[in-house]
Image (cartoon, coloured by chain):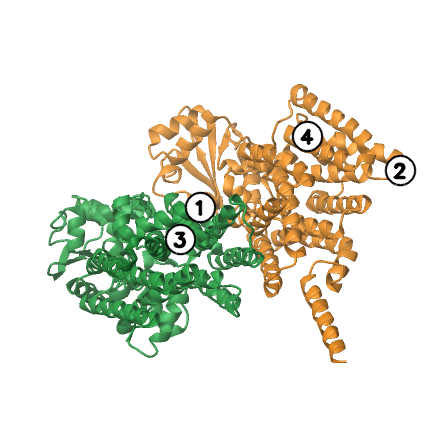
Chain colours: A orange, B green
Amino acid sequence: MDNNNNSNSKDDRSKDDRSNQNIISQSNKYFAHLTNYKNYYLLSLTLVVTLIPLLMSIFSNNLLIQGEESYFHLIEAGGYSTTTIFPYFLKMLNYQYINNIFIILPLLLAFGSIFFLLKTADQLKLPPEFTLFFLVMLIITPVFIDTFSTLSLYGFYTLLISLGFYLISNENKRVKWMACIPFILATFTDLASVIFLAALLTIYSIIFKENRRISIFLIALIITLGIFNFFAMSMNFFINHFHSQHLTIDLISDLGGKSGLGMFTLLLSLIGLSTTWKKKNFYFAYFFTIPLIIFYWYNTQTVFHLTILIIFFSTVGFINLFNRKWTLESLKRFSLLLIVLGILFSTLTYLGRSTDNQFSIEEAETLGWIKDQISEEGKIYSFPDKSNFINYFSYKDTFHNLDSDENKKKAANIILNSTYADQTLPLLEDNNINIIYVTEDMKLTLPSDQGLLFLLKNERFKLVHSQGDTEVWVFSKLNN
Amino acid sequence: MKIKAKHWLLIIVILTLAIRLIVSFSIPNLTYDSYFHLRQIEHIEETGLPLFQDDLSAGGKQLVFLPLFHYLMAFFTLILPIGIVAKIIPNLLFSTLPIISYFIAKTLTKDKNSSLFSALITAFLPITFLTNAVTPVSLFLPLIFLAIYFFLNIKIKNHLLFYIITLFCLCLTSSATFLIIVGFLIYLLLIALENKKMDNAELELMAFSLFFYVWTQFLFFKEVLIKEGISFIWQNIPSQIVQEYFPKLSVANSLILVSFIPFVAGVYVVYKALFQPGKQKSFLLISLVISTTLLAWFRLIQFKLSLAFFGMVLAILFASFYQEMINYVKKTKFIKFIPMITITAIIILLVTIIPPAISHAIEQDTPTNEEVLAFTTIKELSNRNSGVVSLIEESHLITYYSQRKNILDTRFTFVENVDQRFKDITSIYTTKFQTHALSLLNQYGINYIVLTEKAKEKFAIESLEYVDNECFQQVYKNNTLVYQVKCELKIEN
């Protein structure tokens, strides 16, 4: 009797142990619920995460279309000289006269991308916990929020490739071949993205052998189109710069980056990388790593692609970490809590400062004033990371932007920092600069006792308009 | 009667504490940086909260620091006056180091006598013999070695809990806890390189420590990280003096501060452990040595702290060296000389470590009584909004004794134009032109200039060249001079 009781209690204890250890398995009823309803939860999360920046813009009295990149594409949509597909898409939407479509377009792109990714995962029968964690981490990553809160080429690209993979994974052969359309459209972005897509399809063809024929055809088609677009259509290798490059800051959002990912996600990816090291199934992921790091080195705008890889490793690291049996059981739950809090912390901090450096209505109105009131030909001088925004609202060219050549950057730097009028003024004349557009961040970051702000005291500059923290100064040329 | 090891340990601890307290009370004041911490402790004592928004430091700015040490000190000020607490508690904390190093060494060697050597070296390690410094390092060092001890004995009942508590305290004491985290990573690497099996519990604890550390630091330093990015590591230290905080390793200087014999013994133990099999126990400590060296080399950690940590680890590793030496002698015909060898080793150690330790303590950089009086006088002479300029290292005396604003002190984080401020302070002391000096003094709202002996020595001046009776009034005269600024520079159109 006693023996029986003992063995029963031992069984119960080991059962308890197991249930304590099985945090991310179907035996955990909460986790099982999450995976069963993951589609609803993930789509809701996408909506919430992409709505927050929009709502914050509304409450902060800022413009509802944010991001330097948005205005770059909107300007291109107004012209005919674009090499990417996105401005044509924007132009097409504009023709339909759907009011305010551009405001909710990023949200729709995000929703569509996640929807198709979920459907693809279902069709490919990927492990539900992998799909859940991968997509949760992706959705709450600052780079995702940044991409899908602006009119972003990579946002559109994500929708196209997720739709493409959804179609190619379909059982119906005709539907499969329809994947050609989004994949072909996705080649009109930049060459780095084309290479990324070709690599994704290569991996897809290796893992899902039943779709190998069509995958190989698509890879060949994509590479051919990519090369054609690059050489014949002058498509860029990388997308343009929309903010100043900083290798560390652009990768880790917690260090004040504009997008990037959280430190915890990065740490988890290192765990993922170390646990999968030399495992045959993961060779394809390593195959990705080096080119993506090189791309990132050259243009931090490609952090979007790198993030997808890092999140893949983070998901693997997270699942490996919490699927294994821990010797120190009590630490397991505590560590899980810490990681979840850490990841959320990065997201919340990022969202909290998402209104910093946003374009305000005030700024747009000032630029509108320039458009209406200053008819004289000439260029505007301001910070380069706002050049498209300035260009869009003022209908005037800026002297330089982040992709300007070195000579222009050098001249811009002299104008910004030189205290000597005889050095700065000829530069302004030679480069046909007649407007200095001073913004709040210029006043915050530039010294007032030297450099450009100090030189504005010179008699040849005249303050013609000021609204809130923005000022418009006109520079009168000597021959005038 | 044979004295037991624990009694020897007690003697070492009492001896070190006694010497520390004697030296401490024989030096009247505390190190310059201590006054920042004293101010925080007093603020906690009065309000229950640290002074995170300081209106006096660099004309007013946000301060970011981990407050556990200040809370601990503030707790003792409930029982004793702050002047006594400032001298006793840090020394008491430093005096726990020999106990901790004894137990770590005992875990490694299982030998009490060898471990006593570690305790002895730790007790008089010159670099930690700072008797008049009120600094979180005095709490950080015991805690970090306590954490190492609990980590090494994680399988003993309750040690996991103790480790977590210690780690929690560490993360709230100093960001230098990073040392142990990097040490863990190197430990993992060494184990992998040696193809040894990693203990699961250790692995889990390392992962937990990493995430816990990162999380707590994010909570406290969120704003600094966002504002300063990766440069938060260098704490916005002016480029002109960054060399003082992160100097290049000088082997000779380092040898004196960590003691020559433990250093040589440490190098031997590290060599043996790395290149001979069966020495996995020491791997963690060796990893910590490597991590400290690397972090100091790459200027990611302050030199003095890394040296203190390094010295402690070497002291612990000395136990392994001594044990090995005795085991070797036991195999030779010199076995009967073991007691003599032990006594000789003790004498050599005492001779080589105690004098540098005491001399290091006596040479601590503290203000003189007369300087303290000068700063106290400013408080009586000036009004609340006055600003005072002195050397950067003396600036905490302005905020503590004078209770007035300074231009720049050693808390550089969040200071705008830190390099310019540093340059301007130098200009105030070295310029020959009164207009230049006045423009700078007006710009920072400075009403008093303090010229100490240290400032005279630093700038190689006897007095301020531009000072005259019209614009400056000498309000304090002794070795230290205090001038009141009476003129204002106005630009007339």
Which residue is depicted at the point 75% across and 34% down? A206
- The residue that disc 2 covers is A172
Q: Are marks 1 and 4 on the same chain?
A: no
Disc 4 marks a residue whose amino acid type is Val
Label 1, label 2: how far apart the Cα atoms are:
64 Å
The CA span between labels 1 and 4 is 52 Å
Label 3 sits on residue: B414
| Residue A391 falls left or right of residue A163 | left
In the structure shown, which secondary structural element does the residue marked by tag 2 occupy? loop
Percent position of residue B109, x then y: 41, 59
Mark 3 belongs to chain: B
- Which labelled disc corresponds to residue B276? 1
Residue A89 location (% of width, % of height): 73, 34
- Amino acid on which the number 2 mark rests in the picture: Asn
Please give the chain letter of the residue carrying mark 4: A
Coordinates of residue B320 in the picture (x, y in percent): 38, 55
